Image (spheres, rainbow, N blue to C red):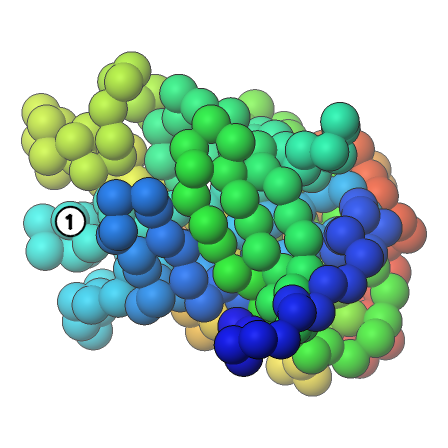
Amino acid sequence: MNMPGLAPSRLPDPSIGSLPGLWRRSLIAWPDGREDRTTFVNWLQGPGLYLDLRQPDGAPAFSGVTCMSDLKPVHMEWLSRQEGFAGELVHEDGWFEWRRDIDFQPQAVYSDMGRLWVEDDVMIEEGKDIPYIEHWHREPLAGGMVWGARLEDRETGAKGAILRYGHLFMFARERLAATPAHHSLSECVAGARDLAQAREFLDCEIAQGAVTSAGWIIQRSTLPFREGKTLSPALTGDLLETDDLDTKGKPLTRHWEITDIRGEPFLDAAHGAI
């Protein structure tokens, strides 16, 4: 990142207060020489709470897939290699830890902890338990109100999360099916007793989208058939409601208890959504 003979440019180390915004990863490298520059990785940081979505290159065509029941093995193999999480970022003793309330993959053995520093406008992350290096770039976003919340589905008890930064949002909903311990999601899906169970293992959504004049439009999702759909969050009494689809593609409304909120939820003047 620096020309030979020039001292590296070093900016003040990041803090929880300086990190809110959207970060894009351009590189992850491991000590054995492996690296990845092609996976789509976006991390949206809010006031303490964060969401993260990671999708590998080479997605199959999802034309004709409108719901969970339409997923075929070719789709499920790629879907199972996605990653994503939601929770709270904390900073203790020089280490940042991305604590995970929701994880698209089965729970990891190691904590997600690392050191952060900035060189030449690139934020570098070095892992603690696994010695990886990641390069992060802050995406330019228009200013605006920032808020986030932890959620709990009133009907199922599933955890959820939502975060808005200006006109960008991310949303997460955990799966209900318990995954076998000590296996990757790919292994869980491959070892499922049937297609129905494999689909249950994949029924976890982490999505990113934009608040537009047409509504809260999902642009990327771990469930690609949700892309282009509206999330339509709205406050009804003490509940946050969001639009979704059941496994057969029938519209449904999810009712979320707000268990933790950071910042002040606000209504979009154009069409009454938060």
Image quarter in which the C terminus is found: bottom right
Say which of 12 and 6 sits in front: 6
How far across and how far down the image is residue 269, in percent?
86, 76
List x then y, in percent, for residue 222: 38, 54
**Is there any visible trace of residue 266 in the rendered image?**
yes
Furthest toward the top, the residue is 181
Q: Can you tell which quarter of the image residue 254 is in? A: top right
Extreme-bottom residue of the structure: 213
Task: From this view, report whether residue 62 is shown above or below residue 223.
Answer: below
| Other residues around mark 1 within 10 Å, as few (<14) / some (14–19) / many (≥20) | some
Q: Position of residue 38 (x, y in %)?
A: 32, 68
Residue 22's place in the image compared with 198, above or below, is: below
Q: Which residue is mark 1?
A: 77
- In this view, the residue farthest toward the right is 264
Secondary structure under tag 1 reads helix
Image point (19%, 38%), residue name: 186
